[in-house]
Image (cartoon, rainbow, N blue to C red):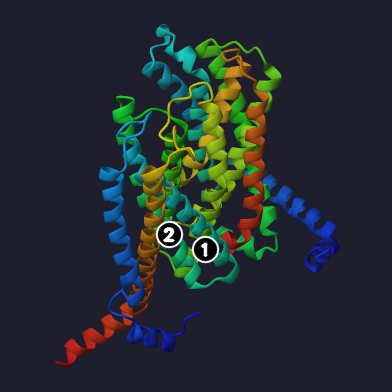
Amino acid sequence: MAERTRAAAGAPTGTVRAVLADARLVAGKDLRLELRSRVGLSQVLPFALLVVLLFAFALDPDRRVLGAATPGLYWMVVLFSSVLAVGRTFAVEAEDGVLDGLRLSGLSPAGIYLGKVGALLVELLVLDLVLALAVVVFYGTEISGPVLLAAVVATATVGIAGAGGAYGGLTARMRGRDTLLPLLLLPLLAPVLIGGTRGVEVALGRDAGPGWPWVGLLGIFALVYLTLGTLMFRPLLEDA
Amino acid sequence: MTTTATTSDAVTSAPTSTGSTATRVLGAASLVGIALLVVFGVFVSPPDKELGETIRILYMHVPTVSVAYLAFVVTAVGSAMYLWKRTEFWDLLAASSAEIGVVFFGLTILNGMLWGKITWGVFWRWEPRLTTTAVLFLTYIGYLAVRAVPASPRTRGTRSAVVGLLAVVNIPIVHKAVDWWRGLHQERTIFGTLKPEIQGTQAFAAYLGLMVFLLLFAWLLIHRFRVAFLAERAAESGLEGAIAERRQEAGQ
């Protein structure tokens, strides 16, 4: 309580600590909700695996097209599944005016944003991992640079969660949000798709070019959208 | 915020057209400029040594893409100012500018494709600048889609301001990503010979194109802004007007 009062008085260290504490609360709530409802596990993850399977049907696996396209296909599946995950994360808040409740709870908007992004990040990283295993098993992919691969996947996913958190909050209470969210989010994530695909190509030994500059680009994307999301969540929460 | 009294004042004092002496002069100057650009760009200036006749497309391509980027910068400034000042002016300015930016981006893609068909033999190649334009075009289509969703002016303004800012920050990142992506596949681009060496009537046509399209942008922006302003006033007085009309009908 004392900490919260200090935060309200505007003490800088208290504010940062209070925002992080709020973020932990919101992320914990979201992850508990996810664990109990199992929507991600029973709907988003099977959807992602389904798309992995459908790509194999679309690109005949015997003609080597599938192998050559693996990095790009991997990120396409991650992006489409992310749209579903982001929509789901904010759909639970939009019903019954929960967002207004969150707003009235005294939690800082930046804390709510970072909390939603944190929970989304954990969910998406689990999805990344399962998908990577699926791709290795079904597409027969071999990994030559595991450290680079992990760095590319992690930074790209932070970027996806950061941008997803901002656009999820924006569309949460909008009419037609299910169709708007992909239209807004996917063009924004084009650099993540490019950087992620090229980075993974290098990590799989398909491309000789340096992989780390892509991690840098993905890191800048993530940093920019985390900052913007943190700054803009207050107007979004209050007026959108 | 607007009260009912000022609303009805605004409605009665609102102009019935979006034109004024200043915009008529601006419009006339734009049209004369376009005519001059056609004369210089198509007939007077010589073909280029490298690009041949296709350099004439450049006189339109460079201005359309420049104006589109300028329009998105105006949208970003309007968006930031709206979140700060919360006045209708900045919201409508951002929205009007974005709409014109999307039209000019569309034109850029079209004349880029025409250039591609002549030079490469195909309408589309994954040339970095064309690709970037396509991605950003779709980003701003999203902005317009957000604006089209019915909401109160403040809600709509906030949503679109956030999209306007998130989108403009992405422009340099998309540029960088696409440039690196196509790093090994440099094509001869539409900007291939746009160096200071172009001289005489070629240089004149290039700069004239830029000037003319800037005038055109200002002209379109003022009109679009005024249309948006009048649409807001009409929306505000819509219900009142409808009730008054029904009353009149009942009275007859």
Residue A31 x/y as whole percent: 65, 42
Marked residue nearer the N-terminal end (2 or 1): 1
Residue lying furthest front in this view?
B200
Residue lying furthest top in this view?
A62
Residue A112 x/y as whole percent: 66, 53
> Label 1 near label 2: C-beta < 8 Å?
yes
Is residue A182 placed above or below B122 in the rendered structure? Answer: below
Is residue B239 placed above or below A20 in the rendered structure? Answer: below
Is residue A214 placed above or below A6 in the rendered structure? Answer: above
The answer to whether one can see residue A177 in this image is no
**Callout 2, which amino acid?**
Ser
Observer-nearest of B208 and B129: B208
Observer-nearest of B177 and A113: B177
The CA distance from mark 2 to mark 1 is: 9 Å
In the figure, residue B183 lies in which quadrant?
Answer: top right
Residue at horizontal 47%, vertical 38%?
A: B197
Around disc 1, counting alpha carbons within 10 Å, would you say few (fewer than 14), some (14 to 19), or many (20 or more)? many
Residue at horizontal 47%, vertical 22%?
A: A52
Observer-nearest of B144 and A94: B144
Q: Which mark is residue B226?
A: none
**Callout 1, which amino acid?**
Gly
Q: Which residue is mark 2?
A: B97
**Quadrant of the frame with the N terminus of chain A:** bottom right
Task: Output the chain of dot 2.
Answer: B
Which element is circle 2 on?
helix
Residue at horizontal 65%, vertical 56%?
A: A231
Q: Which residue is mark 1?
A: B78
Around disc 2, counting alpha carbons within 10 Å, would you say few (fewer than 14), some (14 to 19), or many (20 or more)? many
Which element is circle 1 on?
helix
